[in-house]
Structure formats: structure tokens, C-alpha cells
Amino acid sequence: MFYLPWFFSCRLIIIFAIAAISFGIFPSKLMSQDPIVPDTIVEAHEPIVPDTIVEPQHTEEMLQNQLEAIAEESESEVDFSEVIEDLEVFLKNPLNINTATADDLRRLMVLSEIQINNLLYHISKFGRLISLLELQSIEGFDIETIRRIQPFVTVQQETFRRHFRLSNLARDGQSQLFLRYQQFFEPQKGFSPITPEELLANPNARYLGSPFRLFTRYRFTYFNNISIGFTAEKDPGEEFFRGTQPHGFDYYSGHVFLRST
């Protein structure tokens, strides 16, 4: 009997297998498989681009971040109590950029005069904004600027006139009262006790009033349409509701702002 070496036997098996596949001797199921067709067809959609730049934040965190940025950028002294009041109003009733004036935009304490002028010029020339993201096409507005003003502004096409009824003012109006008391703990010579004889000899040796500083501000707002308020301040050493100041505070100021839309 004739025997082939084992490596020749392996080669012959491989050759016969290739020939069988080439001439279709093997079953078709081993040759190919039908393509797998899914039960459902997923249609392609355009990516949804949100009209937002930043994620929502808590009110306190948002105000804190804004105040820190204003403090770093401001070169002059800023009354942060008034800034906080304005930003809180805009958080509850966002400013409509399409109808905002230059003074409205300045109250955001973020935009420069160049940015404000570019924004107003863009709206007057090309019409009202459709989306907040459109601000990127205006010179001077980068992502960081849009990110900072986004929580306080909105973009609306339609405007409407509010009815200033007393019932609406009482229901939807917001009142804010701010008080600040300040006094040094260290004894000050100008407020120390003095004998009548010494005071008669030197009338300017002591202050007539109390040593504390008192600041108060009241403000009533109705959306972005009405703002009425007053400010009063007393400095250390000034009399309060007596003597030279029978009407209380040494400084008074007030404002009234009305807008129909």
C-alpha cells in the first residue's frame, strides 16, 4: 500500500476544499448569508441647536458670578446694591433686546458703549433678532459676552402694551427695601463725652449727631414697565430727626420710570 507523507495530505485537502467552493459544491448557506435588514429604519434628522449658550444656574450663583465680574472690570466705584436690584428684576422679567434702549442695556453692567451702539445699529439696519445666538454676528459680541447676559435678556418678536390697573399692580408688582447700617466699634474722639464748658469754649470739638451711617432705598417695579423708588442717606455725625435735620436724612433722591411696552 502506498502512503503519502502527512504534509502532502494536508495540501490535497486544502486544494479539494478550494475547488469545491469555486464550483458551488458546498451548500449556499455556507457560501453566503442574506443581509440583515433591521425591523425599523431610523430616519436622519438635523442636529437640534438650542437657543442657549449656558446651562441654567441657581439665582444666587448667577448673581454672585456677575457681581464678581463687574467688580473686576469696573474702574470706578459701583453701587452694588442698585446693581443687584436691577439684575434681580431682569432675572424675573428678562429684558427684550429687540425693544431695549441704550439706557436699558447699560443697566446690565456688562456691555460697553461700543457693543451697545453696534447692537442698536444692527437691529435698526437688519431688523429684530430672531435668536439670541444671532448676537455672534454683531461686532464685539463673543461667546463669553453672550454667556454673561443670557440669563437677563430675551429675544421676542411681538410686543404688547400692559394695562396699568391697580389690581394688576398690586398682584404683579415687586417691592424691595434695602437698609444698611454702619458704625465703627472703636471709640472716636468726635463722639466722646465732653463737658458743657469745653463745648462752649470749642463748639466744633464734637459732632452734633450720632456716630452711625444709615442708608435706605425703596423700589417698586412692575415688570420692566414701571420703576418708582427713593434713596435716603445719613452720614456719621449728622443729626437725625432733630436739631439741624428735623426731616430725618441729610440726603434724599428719587426716580420715576414708566414705559408702555
Image: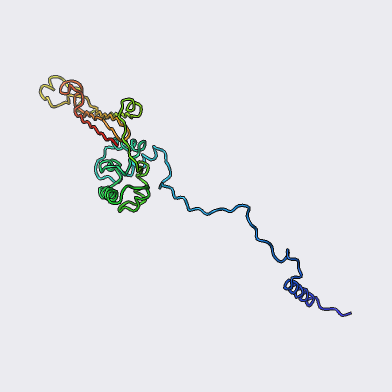
Q: Residue furthest bottom?
A: 2
Q: Position of residue 139 (x, y in %)?
A: 30, 54
Q: Viewed as shown, does residue 58 lie left or right of 239?
A: right
Q: Quadrant of the N terminus?
A: bottom right
Residue toward you, 65 or 124: 124
Q: Which color mode does the image show? A: rainbow
Q: Position of residue 152 (x, y in %)?
A: 35, 41
The image quarter containing residue 19 is bottom right
Number of numbered callouts drawn: 0
Q: Quadrant of the C terminus?
A: top left
Q: Where 205 falls versus 64 (above or below)?
A: above
Q: Residue furthest left?
A: 201
Residue toward you, 50 or 107: 50
Q: Residue furthest right?
A: 1
| Rendered residue at 46%/50% (across/down) | 48
Residue toward you, 211 or 50: 50
Q: Where 122 falls versus 260 (above or below)?
A: below
Q: Where 84 falls versus 211 (above or below)?
A: below
| Rendered residue at 25%/45% (across/down) | 75
Q: Position of residue 196 (x, y in %)?
A: 14, 19
| Rendered residue at 56%/53% (across/down) | 42
The image quarter containing residue 11 is bottom right
The image quarter containing residue 91 is top left
